[in-house]
């Protein structure tokens, strides 16, 4: 038994190292390398969502359209015009939502396209094409990782009232608060490492992303509990599925993406870059 557990732990560690190296290398190089990783994450999330929610058991046309839509979004991200990605994404989601309004297709179908497509788009938008995008992506990574790690250890050490017992019985309010504090501190450290002057805005953004990442974790737990599955898939040895690993990250990216859109609408002009927006530049 001990030997078996040791091998499982080794597999988990090796898988984690490989994933971290691949993601950080792609983040460093940016461009097509990172867009490729973002597109792959989106496609794998859609695959896992389809499997969990059993979309293949529903409308064959809707399922085929969902995969075609994800392929088009991914191809446009990789080789198309950047300013066409969001309109294309929105149009495809709305097109798939119409049959749901007519009750011909389950709402899980357009929801899956929205979740997976926006995961890829928001990741790519944050990294962008410049060096500031690299720092911005590191900022998001550190906020999410610090939140996740400290929430686990603080929750185990302190315990106390449950955060959402019906969705994820192991999570506590103490862990959520500890994780949020760690996420904010981690984000501020990244910002202060690269910029001489940072304002309260960076702390507020880190706070929002940390909270969003925990909501993302709870959301995935809700989906799995709703459909009675333990892991989103077995794609990652020792870790389960892609959704299991990026649930918090994609929700943090969603938060950054929508904050940027709100900031753009509020200022009456386009945001220069996601990195500039996150750091208040």
Image: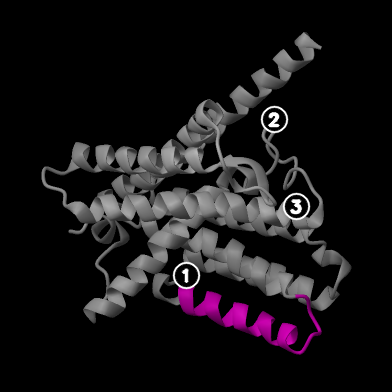
**Residue lying at 29% horizontally and 55% vertically, measured from the top left:** 204
On screen, residue 199 above or below 189: below
Indicate the position of residue 23 as horizontal and vertical percent values.
Answer: 48, 40
Looking at the rendered image, the disc whose residue lies closer to the viewer, 1 or 2, is 2
Image quadrant in which the C terminus is located: bottom left
Task: Mark 2 or mark 3: name the one nearer the start of the chain.
Answer: 3
Q: Which residues are magenta?
A: 85-106
Residue at numbered disc 3: 225
Vertical position of residue 31 compared to residue 193: above or below: below
**Can you say which quadrant of the picture contains the N terminus?**
top right
Q: Residue at x 55, y 36 (%)?
A: 160
**Magenta-drawn stretch contains 102:** yes
Q: State yes or no: residue 210 in magenta.
A: no
| Residue bearing the label numbered 1 | 80
Left/right of residue 131 with respect to residue 159 in the rendered view? left
Instruction: Please indicate, yes or no, whether residue 210 appears anywhere in the rendered image.
Output: yes
Which element is circle 3 on? helix
Q: How many marks?
A: 3
- 161 or 278: nearer the viewer: 161
Q: Which residue bears the numbered disc 2?
A: 238
- Of badges 3 and 1, nearer the viewer stands 3
């Amino acid at each position: 038994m001990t030997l078996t557990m040791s091998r499982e732990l080794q597999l988990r560690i090796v898988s984690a190292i490989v994933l971290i190296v691949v993601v950080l290398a792609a983040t460093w190089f940016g461009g097509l390398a990172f867009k490729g990783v973002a597109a792959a994450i989106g496609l794998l999330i859609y695959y896992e969502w389809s499997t969990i929610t059993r979309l293949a058991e529903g409308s064959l046309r809707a399922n085929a359209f969902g995969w075609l839509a994800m392929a088009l979004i991914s191809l446009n991200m990789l080789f198309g015009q950047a300013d066409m990605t969001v309109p294309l994404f929105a149009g495809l989601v709305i097109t798939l939502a119409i049959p749901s309004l007519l009750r011909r297709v389950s709402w899980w179908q357009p929801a899956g396209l929205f979740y997976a497509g926006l995961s890829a788009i928001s990741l790519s938008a944050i990294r962008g094409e410049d060096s500031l995008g690299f720092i911005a992506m590191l900022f998001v990574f550190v906020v999410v990782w610090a939140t996740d790690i400290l929430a686990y250890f603080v929750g185990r050490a302190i315990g106390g009232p449950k955060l959402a017992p019906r969705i994820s019985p192991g999570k506590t309010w103490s862990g959520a608060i500890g994780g949020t504090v760690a996420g904010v501190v981690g984000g501020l450290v990244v910002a202060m490492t690269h910029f001489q002057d940072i304002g309260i805005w960076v702390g507020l953004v880190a706070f929002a992303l940390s909270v969003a990442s925990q909501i993302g974790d709870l959301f995935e737990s809700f989906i799995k509990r709703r459909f009675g599955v333990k892991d989103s898939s077995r794609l990652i040895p020792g870790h389960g599925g892609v959704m299991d690993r990026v649930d918090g990250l994609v929700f943090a990216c969603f938060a950054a993406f929508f904050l940027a859109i709100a900031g753009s609408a509020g200022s009456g002009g386009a945001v220069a870059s996601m990195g500039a927006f996150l750091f208040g530049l």
